[in-house]
Image (cartoon, rainbow, N blue to C red):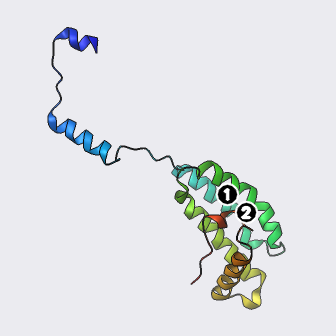
Amino acid sequence: MDQLKASGKPFDISKQEVWDAWIKVKGNQAAFLPAVSREALKKMSTAVRSWRLHRRINSTEADLARMINPIVRGWMAYYGAFYHTELTPVLDRINTYLLRWIMKKYRKSGTLRKARQAMAQAAARRPRYFAHWIWVKPAVK
């Protein structure tokens, strides 16, 4: 700042530039929203895919919950602290794998409609059984 005063040069900023900067700050367009990065989302999706939940038909709901809840809680606490809606695609993917698990585990009622109903009933009975059900409810259509 002292260098500018010593040089005797006036600031070379137009009124339009100042006005545009003010509009951005006033409209909160210059704000920073910390969220999960695309790379982290890809790693989480890869991890969910590697669990192969839909293939674990010998496991019970309790086994699946014990396996995935600590990991998902960690993701929700770390990445979802500020902007948790960015985790929705990954959490929805977990629900999709759980639906597929229901369809394979209980083959007699293996239709998608019945699996959705069963999952919705399970979520209504125990809404915190799976950690991600706090933010993303199972699809009911």
Q: Where is residue 10 in the image (x, y as percent from the top left)?
A: 15, 19
Q: What's the mark number on residue 47?
A: 1
Instruction: Report the residue at 63% width, 58% height from top.
Output: 46
Residue lying farthest front?
A: 26
The amino acid type of the residue labelled 1 equals Ala
Q: Could you tell me which secondary element the residue under label 1 belongs to? A: helix
Whether residue 83 is situated above or below residue 13 in the rendered picture: below
> Which one is in front, 33 or 103?
33
Q: What's the mark number on residue 12?
A: none
Quarter of the view holding residue 22 = top left
Label 2 and label 1: CA atoms lie apart by: 6 Å
Instruction: Report the residue at 65% width, 51% height from top.
Output: 77
Location of the C terminus by quadrant is bottom right
Q: Could you tell me which secondary element the residue under label 2 belongs to? A: helix
Location of the N terminus by quadrant is top left
The amino acid type of the residue labelled 2 equals Trp
Left or right of residue 3, residue 51 in this image: right
Whether residue 100 is situated above or below residue 12 in the rendered picture: below
Residue lying farthest bottom?
A: 108
- Say few, some or many: other residues with alpha carbon within 10 Å of mark 1 (under 14 / 14 to 19 / 20 or more): few
Circles 2 and 1, Cβ within 8 Å, touching? The answer is yes
Instruction: Report the residue at 19% width, 10% height from top.
Output: 7
Left or right of residue 90, residue 66 in this image: right
Instruction: Report the residue at 59% width, 62% height from top.
Output: 90
- Say few, some or many: other residues with alpha carbon within 10 Å of mark 2 (under 14 / 14 to 19 / 20 or more): some
Whether residue 81 is situated above or below residue 15 in the rendered picture: below
> Which one is in front, 7 or 48?
7
Label 2 sits on residue: 51
Q: Where is residue 19 in the image (x, y as percent from the top left)?
A: 20, 40
Q: Where is residue 135 in the image (x, y as percent from the top left)?
A: 61, 64
